Image (cartoon, rainbow, N blue to C red):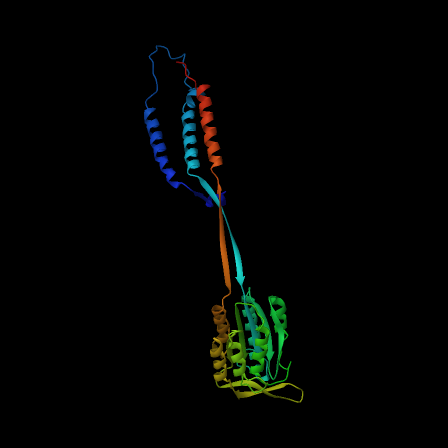
């Protein structure tokens, strides 16, 4: 009931000023009938009962019904209306490719538990927050390949993300190859906005495509792909795998972190993106949050509103009150003149 009343509006709310006249009439009626009881002198009152008859008790009922009739009539004339609202949404999603370096240096432990696993988990959190977008995954080290094409199936994408591990492909850092494969996945996209998030911790030392050439292709007007680049790794020295022992177990030592920030900045600048440096888990999380804010999915919403007339119950209630008052006056309360 309260939910229904919350939806009620009145087309002619100024009509409610008539309640002032109703109130004044009630006041006049009360004052008029205050001292209207009749009295007669009679020597013996035993013939009269001490109790008032039901008719005397209900003498004001026709007037009350008339007032009720006026109240309902005023509400009806004010035209109560209920509204039904709904929305129609049109979503313009963004196509996103995450190009992730999985070279041996991504096992360095300056991010916890290491760069690769931290990058995977934080990227998965980002994927889960992008409800309306198509997202794909490209991995690269000495070469590159598509781990997952553009998809809206977030569960499948996350499962394929979890399957990524160092050593899946030849070691090295082919940034140009990784970027080129990501561009190839977006070239036929019809999305209004296309972006690549390229994440690496080293310098380009493999592949047949230079990072600059790949950036020029992405920036071409026919593709218009924006690239956000992320350099992963602390500044200075990081505990990194240097070799394996005779049992195949990785041996770690502190190694200088070398990231080609100049090239990563150039890629971002050419394509209209940004370069970020992630030196720990927290800064990498903040980078993804910033990209999430920068690349918002466009949702076009149309609001519809319909009005339903709700004066009928009040009009019928007014008519019923009037008819009941009229019938009582010509029957039960009829006066003999």
Asked if 20 appears above or below 82 in the picture, the reply is above
Residue at image coords 42%, 28%:
66
Residue at image coords 49%, 35%:
313
Quadrant (top left, top right, bottom left, bottom right) of the C terminus: top left
Asked if 205 appears above or below 182 in the picture, the reply is below
Q: Is residue 114 visible?
A: no
**Closer to the camera in the image, 292 or 146:** 146
Asked if 62 appears above or below 272 in the picture, the reply is above
Asked if 306 appears above or below 191 in the picture, the reply is above
Q: Position of residue 245 (x, y in %)?
A: 64, 89
Residue most extreme to the top: 43
**Closer to the camera in the image, 79 or 162:** 79
Q: Quadrant of residue 103?
A: bottom right
Q: Position of residue 317 (x, y in %)?
A: 47, 32
**Closer to the camera in the image, 223 or 32:** 223
Q: Position of residue 141 (x, y in %)?
A: 60, 82
Q: Quadrant of residue 130?
A: bottom right
Q: Is residue 197 visible?
A: yes
Q: Is residue 163 left or right of residue 8?
A: right
């Amino acid at each position: 009931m309260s939910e229904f009343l919350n939806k009620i509006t009145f087309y002619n709310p100024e009509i409610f000023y008539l309640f002032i006249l109703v109130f004044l009439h009630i006041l006049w009626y009360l004052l008029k009938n205050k001292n209207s009881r009749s009295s007669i002198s009679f020597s013996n009152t035993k013939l009269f009962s001490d109790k008032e008859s039901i008719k005397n008790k209900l003498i004001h009922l026709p007037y009350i019904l008339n007032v009720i009739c006026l109240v309902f009539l005023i509400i009806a004339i004010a035209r109560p209306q209920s509204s039904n609202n709904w929305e129609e949404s049109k979503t313009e999603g963004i196509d996103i490719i995450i190009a992730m370096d999985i070279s041996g240096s991504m096992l360095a432990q300056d991010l916890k538990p290491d760069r690769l696993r931290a990058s995977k988990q934080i990227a998965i959190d980002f994927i889960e927050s992008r409800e309306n977008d198509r997202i794909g995954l490209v991995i690269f080290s000495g070469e590159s390949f598509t781990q997952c094409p553009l998809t809206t199936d977030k569960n499948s994408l996350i499962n394929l993300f979890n399957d990524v591990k160092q050593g899946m492909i030849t070691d090295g850092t082919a940034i140009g190859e990784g970027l080129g494969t990501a561009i190839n996945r977006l070239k036929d996209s019809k999305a209004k906005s296309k972006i690549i998030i390229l994440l690496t911790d080293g310098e380009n030392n493999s592949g047949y495509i230079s990072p600059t050439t790949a950036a020029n292709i992405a920036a071409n007007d026919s593709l218009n792909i924006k690239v956000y680049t992320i350099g992963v790794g602390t500044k200075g020295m990081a505990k990194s795998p240097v070799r394996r022992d005779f049992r195949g177990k990785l041996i770690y030592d502190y190694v200088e972190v070398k990231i080609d920030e100049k090239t990563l900045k150039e890629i971002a600048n050419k394509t209209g993106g940004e370069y970020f440096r992630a030196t720990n888990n927290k800064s990498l999380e903040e980078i993804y949050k910033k990209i999430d804010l920068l690349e918002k999915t466009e949702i076009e919403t149309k609001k519809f509103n319909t009005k339903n007339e709700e004066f009928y119950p009040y009009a019928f209630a007014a008519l019923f009150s009037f008819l009941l008052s009229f019938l009582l006056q010509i029957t039960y309360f009829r006066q003999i003149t």
